[in-house]
Each structure stands twice: as structure tokens, then as C-alpha cells.
Image (cartoon, rainbow, N blue to C red):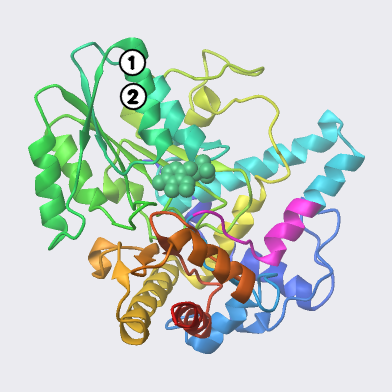
């Protein structure tokens, strides 16, 4: 299979990125897209200049300093929205300033170049051909492009997980009501013994008319992680399509979509990828591309278009200064290492769960404790305490940004240290006494 060359020379990508962050320490380095490089110094970024095999706590402290999170604030809200490293913010801001001063077609051509670079990097990051990738505005839009783009007949059945996000749940039900196909909702055990139990439950829910299985890779309301590769394989064996909503895995899990074997995958850049804002990713397996009708026809769309981005992501005027920065954040991921990022997020969550069990033994875990059944999302409740109230108190009294979804939802990411996790646990202990 033909892959795009963007990640073929991964060292070159990494060198370019190091050149950019190094620029923050010294003087200006010309880049093709920026009118000027960021002024703000990047603290301790020399640590990022060394190859990393096993990053230690000092390394993660330094990674945290690449973000502009104010003193006294702890962001454990990655499932909803993530902060971006400051060089990503600067890139977007510089491009926005440039656009504000010159909106000519000639000047904006460089934003198109930046978008193409972002697409190339994305294809490499996900290990799929460039033509199968599209940049949308968010996961919601990507999910809806699939839901509204496929044709189903009246006897066809779409199988969806009860915990799917509304954009992969209500969206299917609305579509089915309008066009007359069936939607079957399956439930999964809240605390399964192992991933096989989940797979077997899904296998039992498949019927002779099932045409597609749509599920969240990791649930935003329970934190349960599904064995996506095994589910996609099961679906393929039965000639069923698979849609994986990756809002809670894109940017955290060391993904390889060819290996996963899904037909459709969706995600948002403003969640675990850590920016930039308002971009979504849509992957459609090459053989399925002809089965998707466009949801939106905007100027520039053509019947002759061949790539997914041209077919379904021509959506009218976009927030163009945001998209090129996808290339920057992906270089950041590559420099740290995709595997290191996944390992660190898992380490933070395992540590969080362990500390809660030790310091606050009454904690009830909505999310399974086993790493193979969970990811970066940890949801808890405390007996006799209102989760929404706890969520408010965490922010108002301790500067801790969590979410009131499914309980108290805590999602530490690489800009959090183990010390931050200790502070979250300590805050919950104090709020419980
Ligand atoms: C599983 C899942 N899918 C889709 C979405 C929607 O993401 P966005 O608002 O970026 O479109 C979310 C948001 O939390 C989510 O958790």
C-alpha cells in the first residue's frame, strides 16, 4: 500500500521541530509560514533536544513547561479540551495576524500549503494513505459525515454501543427514523473481567442484517476502553463495517489505523492531541470511500475529486490559521515519542487510581481499574457526595479543572506531573472530610 512520505523521514521531521523550538531559545529562524518566530522563550527546552528512551519525572516537568498553564491551575480535563504547547498557540496566532493583515488569495495560498503539510503529517501519524484522510472541524462533524454519508436499506441494521457520544448515537437514530433502517443498541458489562468478555458480548449482539458497528474506542461517560482491533476484525470477518469514534484515543494511544483495521475513524485535535483548536480528523478506508456521500457541497467541490478531503471536507470558509499547526503538534508528539506519550498517560492514570484507593478508600470507580480496560479517562464518585458539587469545588477552591461527566471525570495528560496528581487526590481528600 502506498503511504505518504511525510513520516518516511521521521528524523527530518524531528530535526525541523527541534530547529523550531530551539529558535525560541536563541534568535529567529525563518520558517516558510511564519512572518516572525515566537518571542517567548521556551524554558528548559534543551532537554527536548536530547533523544528520549525512558523519560523521567524531570523530563515530564520540562514538558509541562512547554504549556502556558498558570501557576495554581491543574488541567485534568483532557477528555473535553486540552491546552496546547505555547509554540502551537504562537503558530496559530502568527498565522491569524498575518491573515488579518492580508486576506488576498495570493497571501492565503501559504495556508493551503500548511494544510497540506498537516494532512501529510496526519497520514504518517495514523499510518494510512494520504488520500484516505480528511480534516474536518471536530469529531462531531466527522461522525456525522459517516452517519449521513452512508446508504442503508430498510432491513439493514446499525449496531451502536449504549455509551456512544450523541454524535454517534442520536445521530444514527435520527437518520434511521428519516430513512427507515434499524438501529440496535448493545450494552456492555460495567466491570468486565477482560476484553474478551466485551468482544463476546458484541459478537452475540450481531444479527444477520447488521451492516455496521459504531462504538467509542474509549467511553467519555465511563472511561471503559474497548478492544477496537478485535472488534474491527470481528466485523470484517462478518462483512460488517466498523466506525471507531476516537475522540478519547486520538492523540493519546499510539495509533496505527491499518493495524486496527477499522473502516472509519474519527477524532478531534483539540482533545488528547493537544491542539490546535477546531480541527477534526476523518479516516475512511480506501475501499469505502465511494460509499460515502458528501454531507455538504461548498465552492470548490467537484465530482472528479479523488481524495477523501476533497470529497467530504470541502465545507466552506474555515478557520484556516488553525490547521497548519497540526503539523507542529504532531512533530511534538514525534519528538517525545507516541509510545512514550501513551505510556505516560497510562502511568498517570494508574498512579491516580492507586493513590485514590490508598488515600480515599471509599472511592467508587466508574472506570475499570485494569489498564487493558481503560485509558486516559478515570471517572469516580464518592459516596454521599454530589459529583457536580465536587467538580465545582475542585476548580473554585483548588484550581483543578475536571469534568462532571459520569461522576467526577479526571483525565491527566502529559502536561500533568505526578505531583499534580497528588494535589488532585489531596484536594478530594480534603473535600471529603
Ligand atoms: C466519544 C466522543 N465523541 C465525540 C465527541 C465530540 O467531540 P467534539 O466536541 O470535539 O466534536 C466527544 C466529546 O467529548 C466524545 O467524548
- The residue lying furthest to the right in this view is 101
**Which quarter of the rendering shows the C terminus?**
bottom left
The picture places residue 50, in percent across and down from the top left corner, at: 57, 82
Label 1 neighbour load within 10 Å: few <14, some 14-19, many 20+: few
The quadrant holding residue 84 is bottom right
Contact (Cβ within 8 Å) of mark 1 with mark 2: yes
Determine whether, in the image, residue 153 is placed left or right of residue 123.
Answer: left
Judge whether 282 appears above or below 15 on screen. Answer: above
Judge whether 71 appears above or below 242 on screen. Answer: below
User: 125 or 317: nearer the eye?
Assistant: 317
Magenta stretch contains residue 83:
yes
Q: Which residues are magenta?
A: 80-93
User: 235 or 155: nearer the eye?
Assistant: 155
**Residue bearing the label numbered 1:** 177
**Residue bearing the label numbered 2:** 173
| Residue at the (18%, 13%) spot, across then down | 155
The quadrant holding residue 283 is top left
Q: Is mark 2 within 8 Å of ligand 1?
A: no
Q: Is mark 1 within 8 Å of ligand 1?
A: no
Residue 284 visible? The answer is no
Mark sitting on residue 110: none
Label 2 neighbour load within 10 Å: few <14, some 14-19, many 20+: many
Amino acid at each position: 500500500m502506498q503511504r505518504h512520505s511525510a513520516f518516511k523521514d521521521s528524523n527530518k521531521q524531528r530535526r525541523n521541530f527541534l530547529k523550531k523550538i530551539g529558535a525560541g531559545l536563541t534568535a529567529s529562524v525563518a520558517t516558510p509560514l511564519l512572518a516572525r518566530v515566537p518571542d517567548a522563550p521556551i524554558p528548559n527546552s534543551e532537554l527536548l533536544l536530547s533523544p528520549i528512551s525512558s523519560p523521567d519525572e524531570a523530563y515530564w516537568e520540562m514538558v509541562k513547561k512547554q504549556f502556558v498553564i498558570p501557576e495554581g491551575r491543574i488541567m485534568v480535563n483532557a477528555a473535553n479540551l486540552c491546552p496546547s504547547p505555547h509554540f502551537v498557540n504562537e503558530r496559530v496566532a502568527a498565522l491569524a495576524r498575518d491573515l488579518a493583515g492580508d486576506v488576498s488569495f495570493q497571501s492565503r495560498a501559504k495556508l493551503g500549503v500548511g494544510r497540506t503539510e498537516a494532512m501529510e503529517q496526519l497520514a504518517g501519524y495514523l499510518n494510512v494513505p494520504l488520500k484516505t484522510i480528511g480534516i474536518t472541524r471536530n469529531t462531531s462533524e466527522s461522525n456525522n459525515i459517516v452517519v449521513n454519508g452512508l446508504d442503508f436499506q430498510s432491513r439493514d441494521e446499525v449496531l451502536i454501543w449504549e455509551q456512544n457520544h450523541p454524535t454517534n448515537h442520536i445521530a444514527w437514530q435520527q437518520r434511521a427514523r428519516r430513512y427507515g433502517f434499524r438501529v440496535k443498541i448493545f450494552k456492555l458489562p460495567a466491570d468486565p473481567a477482560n476484553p474478551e468478555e466485551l468482544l463476546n458480548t458484541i459478537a452475540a449482539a450481531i444479527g444477520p442484517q447488521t451492516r455496521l458497528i459504531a462504538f467509542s474506542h474509549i467511553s467519555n461517560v465511563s472511561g471503559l476502553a474497548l478492544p477496537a482491533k478485535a472488534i474491527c476484525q470481528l466485523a470484517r470477518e462478518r462483512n460488517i463495517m466498523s466506525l471507531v469514534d476516537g475522540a478519547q484515543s486520538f492523540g493519546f494511544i499510539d495509533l496505527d489505523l491499518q493495524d486496527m483495521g477499522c473502516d472509519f475513524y474519527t477524532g478531534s485535535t483539540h482533545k488528547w492531541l493537544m491542539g490546535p483548536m477546531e480541527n477534526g480528523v476523518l479516516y475512511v478506508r480506501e475501499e469505502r470511500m465511494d460509499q460515502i456521500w458528501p454531507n455538504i457541497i461548498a465552492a470548490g467541490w467537484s465530482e472528479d475529486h479523488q481524495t477523501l478531503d476533497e470529497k467530504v471536507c470541502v465545507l466552506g470558509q474555515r478557520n484556516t490559521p488553525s490547521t497548519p499547526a497540526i503539523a507542529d503538534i504532531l512533530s511534538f508528539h514525534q519528538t517525545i515519542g507516541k509510545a512514550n506519550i501513551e505510556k505516560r498517560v497510562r502511568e498517570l492514570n494508574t498512579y491516580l487510581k492507586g493513590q485514590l484507593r490508598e488515600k480515599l478508600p471509599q472511592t467508587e470507580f466508574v472506570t475499570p481499574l485494569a489498564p487493558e480496560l481503560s485509558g486516559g479517562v478515570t471517572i469516580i464518585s464518592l459516596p454521599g457526595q454530589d459529583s457536580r458539587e465536587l467538580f465545582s469545588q475542585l476548580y473554585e477552591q483548588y484550581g483543578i479543572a475536571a469534568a462532571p461527566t459520569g461522576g467526577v471525570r479526571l483525565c491527566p495528560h502529559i502536561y500533568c506531573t505526578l505531583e499534580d496528581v497528588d494535589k488532585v487526590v489531596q484536594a478530594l481528600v480534603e473535600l471529603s472530610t
